[in-house]
Image (cartoon, grey):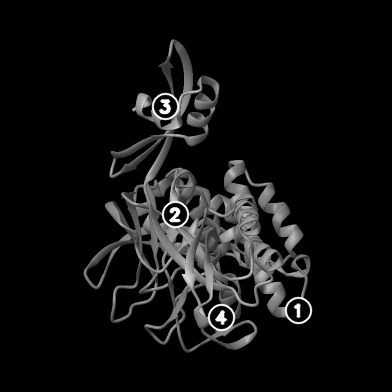
Amino acid sequence: MTIIIDPQSSGIAGNMIIGALVNLGANKDELKEIMEKSAEPFGKVNVNFSKVTKHGIDSTFCHVEMLEHKPSINYPEFIEKINDLDLDENVKKTSINVFERIAKAEAKIHGKTKDTVHFHEVGASDAVADVIGSIYAYYLLNMDKQKIIGLPIAVGGGRVKTTHGIIPVPAPAVVEILKDANIVGGPVDSELATPTGSAIYAEICDEITEFIPQIKPKKTGYGAGRKDFDHPNVLRIIEASDISQKDNIDVIETNLDHLTGEEIGYLFDKLMDTGASDVSITPIIMKKNRQGSLLKVISPRKNREQLINVIFKETGSLGIRIAPNMHRGIAKREFIEKEVEINGHTYEITFKNGYVNGELISSRPEYEDLKRIAQETGIPLRKIKEMIK
């Protein structure tokens, strides 16, 4: 299953996440108890859930009302109180990760260290209830076992009044928390993305992309925001079957016209050993009719810089082209071991199977296994392949 978090029209806040997850099946009575109990060391809150309609869309509104304000405490004391809560360890650990994102953002903005950030800067009791409630519902619905994709966040616009005075929207903390996400301004002159909601989003999303991938929607939950606009102020969370697999890659290219065949072969192996998904070398005609080669490397995002360094060092190239943020569709892959009999002997071979929409589209024996059998038997490789087919 795949979960799509869609804050493109109305932004994101902790109570909106909780409302959408209740809409998807999280137990609201259980959440109310957990949220109120968890917030109590920081100030009493009252949590209520109600069904509301936002411009024709039925949604769940989670209202967290602060009943008590306690003096602010520093971040280490705050985390100590979170650790003392009677909660599942996974819920506590993930919740602390969320609070740490907020604390680091606040510290950077205000020129402090994380440990000197005070509780009112990290969040009050209602923020504690929002974070604990969201993460508790996340585990309640087994979302930790599903892929979560985040779409761009509408952050709003204008200005907002805070304890630090009037600041622009999005708030500096929101910009810092979402520095690796995709954000868009508007569509209203109001604050749409809160630091709490943004930090939860940043923590639980496995991938952040611009568009909904090819999916089969199963269930949709809508969490309502407090404000009313001329459009539905709701956060949409979609539970779906992912019928196509894809990954994010970078394509790295450069032209080669001064390396020998041996040097190109060494470069090929070096790039594969460094983590390239694939390497291809194509003969080309360059300017002034010089013969050369086009080196093309498919790179997982995490290995891009290492691969670029290898190309610079091994080729002496003065320029490398990078096409970032490309998506490639991939079939679901499964490796299956089978035993086959050849000339009276049994050999174990690994087959790589490919599936699209649950249908088997290919089944190929691994080359290294074919090579091993050919060397042991003396039978030509192509014959081994035919016999296995």
Mark 1 residue element = loop
Report the residue marked by disc 4: 171
Mark 4 neighbour density, 10 Å: few (under 14) some (14–19) many (20 or more): some
Residue type at the position of mark 2: Ile
Observer-nearest of 135 and 287: 287
Q: Nearer the viewer, mark 1 or mark 2?
A: 2
Foreground pick, 266 / 161: 266
Task: Say left or right for 215 vs 163.
Answer: left
In three-dimensional space, the C-alpha distance between marks 3 and 1, rounded to whole angstroms, equals: 67 Å
Label 3 – label 4 distance at C-alpha: 65 Å
Rendered view: 324 above or below 79: below
Q: Report crowding for label 2: few under 14, some 14 to 19, many 20 or more residues within 10 A (C-alpha).
A: many
Identify residue for label 1.
111
Sooner in the amino-acid sequence: mark 1 or mark 2: 1
Taking 123 as reference, is 216 above or below it? Answer: above
Q: Which mark is residue 384?
A: 3
Counting residues from the N terminus, which is met first, the one under dot 2 or under dot 3?
A: 2
State the residue at coordinates (56%, 75%): 174
What residue type is disc 1 on? Gly
C-alpha span from label 1 to label 2? 33 Å
Separation of residues labelled 4 and 2 (CA atoms): 25 Å
Using the rendered image of the protein, determine whether residue 63 is visible from the camera's viewpoint. no
Query: Which-is-in-front pick, marks 4 and 2?
Result: 2
User: How far from the left and from the top, in percent, is residue 63?
Assistant: 43, 63
Q: Label 2's element?
A: strand
Q: Which residue is mark 2?
A: 148
The quadrant holding residue 110 is bottom right
